[in-house]
Amino acid sequence: MNSRLSKRVQSIQPSGIRRFFDLASKMDNIISLGVGEPDFVTPWIVREASISSLERGFTAYTANAGLIELRREIAVYMERRFSVSYDPENEILVTIGASEAIDIGMRAILDEGDEVIVVEPSFVSYAPLVQMAGGVAVPVGTSSENDFKASAALIEAAITPKTKAIMLCFPNNPTGSTMNAAEMKEIAEIAERFDLIVFSDEIYAELSYDEDHVSFASLPNMRERTILISGFSKAFAMTGWRLGYVLAPPDLLAAMLKIHQYSLMCAPTMAQYGALEAMQSGMDDVEKMKQSYKQRRNFIVKSFAEIGLSCHTPGGAFYAFPSIASTGLTSEQFAEKLLLEERVAVVPGHVFGAGGEGHIRCSYATSMDNLEVAVERIGNLLQKL
Ligand code: PMP
């Protein structure tokens, strides 16, 4: 142990994704299905609104919770799209990405040793953010047999007297799995019975291809115990803007705001002006991008079947999570071979936690041309194995 560093930080492992990208960045002619972000540039109207805010000299801090106009737009948008109603004055906070929302949500509710059940495979930040807030992440795996949906029975089995919250994400990164209202209600019932808070990361809500997204907070009695997280990165193609938001009942929101105001003050002002425009007039662009992802989703699922790669149909986000178990290789070995021998970068499934081993995450947020070549190269590797 290095005594200059906190034990807490030293106990956290660096993200398993990085090793691959370090390797890939030194190679030529790589097709990357690795990155978890849109391949679109942010819609022009959004960029223009942000530029205009700078031209008009809006360069000061905003309110800690974010521009009130933006919070009002978020409230209108969430009501219209997902039938959840939040008060812009004391139930909505504009954050520096959904990432900050998860971080301050954890810090707001956890005491040392409190447990958070994390449904996995999941976004790689959840468990480390739980740990950095002093909590203990308790993984509960999902599997392709169940379309990577969270199992209420497994969640219930993981509950202890220290359990404080459940972390959910649907549509899911890395599986693309979605959940409908009936399936989520089983988890809601447990949250209520054991008096747990539910973190619902709904950042991919707009990218639901087969069924309308159901917000966890819209289920009966769930609003009061849900920390609903979303943001602009994915649907609006705004990853670099670092803008997200969190919706929660006033006591939870006030606690998060306290952390946010001392550690970050407010989200970047020019980004908030862009986001305001995105909410007011960006929905046509969102719909076009969604249709394009859907077309690519359909292509990749069909193509994987043709080359004999078993893959559940992802209902949302922009990831496919096929099984490579039949090759006898671990997901790390498969991903390494695929990179070194066929020059396709994917992410080995085990980095996403329980249930991820035996799979690879393929982001299809890349051009059709790239996807066609990538599928051919993955097929070549499978032939060789
Ligand atoms: N949640 C999930 C499920 C994600 O996939 C990501 C980005 N990869 C984030 C949150 C973080 O998003 P943001 O850019 O808003 O911080």
Image (cartoon, rainbow, N blue to C red):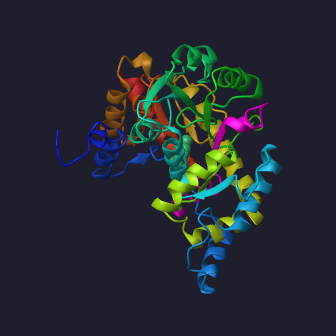
Can you give x and y, in whole percent of width and height, for residue 111 in the image? 45, 36
* Residue at figure coordinates x 59%, y 42% from the top left: 318
Report which quarter residue 310 is drawn in. top right
* Residue at figure coordinates x 73%, y 38% from the top left: 223
Can you give x and y, in whole percent of width and height, for residue 132 in the image? 39, 42
Q: Left or right: 344 with respect to 191?
A: left
Report which quarter residue 219 is drawn in. top right
Q: Is residue 37 visible?
A: no
Residue 1: within the magenta? Answer: no
* Residue at figure coordinates x 29%, y 50% from the top left: 27
Q: Left or right: 22 with respect to 370?
A: left
In which quadrant of the rendered image does the N terminus lie?
top left
Q: Nearer the viewer, residue 360 or 62?
A: 62
In which quadrant of the rendered image does the C terminus lie?
top left
Q: Nearer the viewer, residue 252 or 283?
A: 252
Report which quarter residue 42 is drawn in. bottom right
Q: Residue furthest bottom?
A: 56
Can you give x and y, in whole percent of width and height, for residue 49 in the image? 66, 75
* Residue at figure coordinates x 38%, y 48% from the top left: 30
* Magenta segment: 215-241
Q: Nearer the viewer, residue 142 or 201?
A: 201
Q: How many marks?
A: 0
Q: Is residue 57 above or below residue 162?
A: below
Q: Left or right: 105 with respect to 17?
A: right
Q: Is residue 309 visible?
A: yes
Can you give x and y, in whole percent of width and height, for residue 222 in the image? 73, 33
Residue 228: within the magenta? Answer: yes
Q: Residue furthest left?
A: 2
